[in-house]
């Protein structure tokens, strides 16, 4: 059996599609292991002309995943940046944006916010106002209209994508698919091929997939989701993932301060003075509570 290495470009259950030297191979793992993520570099052995068995996963530079009380779901490995796609309409959830930003910080991945559908003029001022809270934290916000100004959208985003491995996430209806089709030539054809290879049906959008646009650039599309559980992050990881907490950490009276109701807490003082948004502090407490519920 021939040994090869390649990049996982799609995953569905325990079935994976691996790109090895521009050859698409349908692969499975040995036994019941299913801890392979899209973006993983894997070593595999061919079992037939277009099929293989994944033997091992190369060391990951980064790993993004979601988790709830009972299980975790891998999003992608070896990504260098995360694009959170929001829109003027339908409304987006601040909770999902903040959780995505926390996940990116914890994983060591750069985060950007892409505001799509800027052509919906009446909703634009209020949307910009909502996003100002994230801009104030230092997260870049890029405004585009995939449908009405496709060339301008490409001109805005393409330089940011070059040489990077970028995952796009967002709730359903934000226009993520329109952006992918703009940024990835023949994305729809590639998706049909991937679906057929994974035997998931031609119109499925329920799996993550990676498109290589050149030898150094990858764009990863993920299914729309409403929930972003971060049960796997410890309290220490969480406090460091809120970038605005950084100047205040270590300034509390008690070294093991939970930033909840302890006296002389520097983080809570910063919330009261407006340096930290109350919404973000409330999310921090919620995430700490969730991480304490973990059963798996």
Image (cartoon, rainbow, N blue to C red):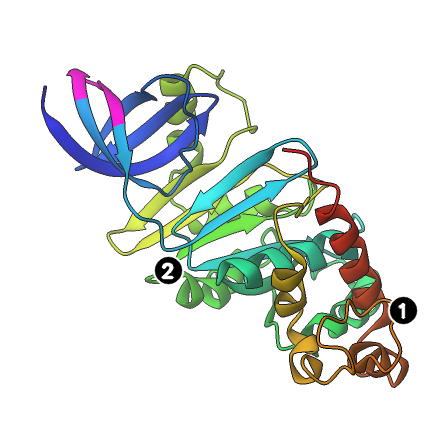
Task: Give the Cα separation between the discs numbered 2 and 1.
Answer: 42 Å
- x and y percentages locating residue 233 in the rendered image: 62, 52
* Residue at 24% in and 52% down: 215
Query: How many numbered circles are shown?
Result: 2
Q: Image point 33% across, 55% down: which residue?
A: 217
Quick check: is 53 in the magenta stretch? yes
Predominant secondary structure in magenta?
Answer: strand
Residue at left 71%, top 83%? 248
Q: Residues within 10 Å of mark 2 (few under 14, many from 20)?
A: some
Residue corresponding to mark 2: 164
Choose between 57 and 288: the one closer to the eye. Answer: 288
Q: Is 256 or 206 nearer to us in this picture? A: 256
Is 145 contained in the magenta span?
no
Point out the stretch of residues depicted in magenta: 46-54
Helix, strand or loop for disc 1: loop
Left or right: where does residue 175 sit relative to residue 208?
right
Q: Name the quadrant of the N terminus.
A: top left
- Determine crowd level at label 1: few under 14, some 14-19, many 20+ residues with C-alpha closer than 10 A: few
The quarter of the picture where residue 40 lies is: top left
Mark drawn on residue 26: none
Give coordinates of residue 118: x percent, y percent: 69, 62
Q: Which residue is mark 1?
A: 261
Relative depth, front residue between 35 and 97 = 35
User: Is 71 placed left or right of 208 in the picture?
Assistant: right
Q: Position of residue 286 (x, y in %)?
A: 80, 54
Secondary structure at numbered mark 2: loop
The answer to whether marks 2 and 1 mark residues whose Cβ atoms lie closer than 8 Å is no
Residue sitting at 60 percent across and 61 percent down? Answer: 237
Within the image, what quadrant is residue 178 found in? top right
- Residue 23 visible? The answer is yes
Which marked residue is nearer to the observer: mark 2 or mark 1? 1
């Amino acid at each position: 059996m021939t040994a090869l290495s390649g990049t996982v470009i799609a995953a569905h259950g325990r079935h994976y599609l691996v790109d090895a030297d521009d050859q698409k191979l349908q692969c499975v793992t040995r036994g019941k292991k299913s801890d392979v993520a899209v973006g993983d570099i894997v070593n595999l052995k061919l079992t037939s002309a277009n099929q293989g068995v994944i033997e091992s996963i190369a060391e990951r530079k980064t790993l993004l995943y979601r988790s709830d009380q009972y299980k975790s779901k891998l999003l992608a490995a070896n990504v260098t940046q995360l694009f959170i796609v929001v829109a003027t309409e339908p409304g987006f959830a601040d909770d999902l944006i903040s959780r995505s930003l926390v996940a990116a910080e914890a994983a060591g991945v750069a985060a950007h916010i892409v505001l799509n559908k800027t052509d919906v003029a009446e909703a634009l001022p209020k949307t910009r106002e909502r996003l100002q809270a994230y801009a104030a934290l230092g997260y870049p916000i890029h405004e585009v209209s995939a449908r009405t100004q496709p060339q301008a959208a490409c001109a805005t985003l393409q330089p940011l994508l070059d040489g990077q491995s970028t995952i796009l996430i967002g709730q359903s209806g934000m226009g993520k698919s329109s952006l992918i089709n703009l940024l990835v030539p023949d994305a729809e054809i590639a998706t049909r091929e991937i679906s057929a290879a994974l035997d998931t049906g031609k119109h499925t959008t329920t799996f993550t997939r990676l498109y290589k646009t050149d030898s150094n650039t990858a764009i990863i599309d993920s299914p729309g989701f409403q929930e972003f559980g971060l049960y796997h992050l410890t309290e220490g990881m969480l406090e460091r993932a809120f970038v605005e907490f950084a100047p205040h950490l270590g300034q509390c009276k008690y070294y093991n301060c939970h930033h909840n109701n302890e006296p002389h807490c520097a983080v809570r003082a910063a919330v009261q003075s407006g340096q930290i948004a109350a919404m973000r502090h409330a999310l921090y407490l919620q995430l700490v509570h969730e991480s304490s519920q973990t059963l798996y």
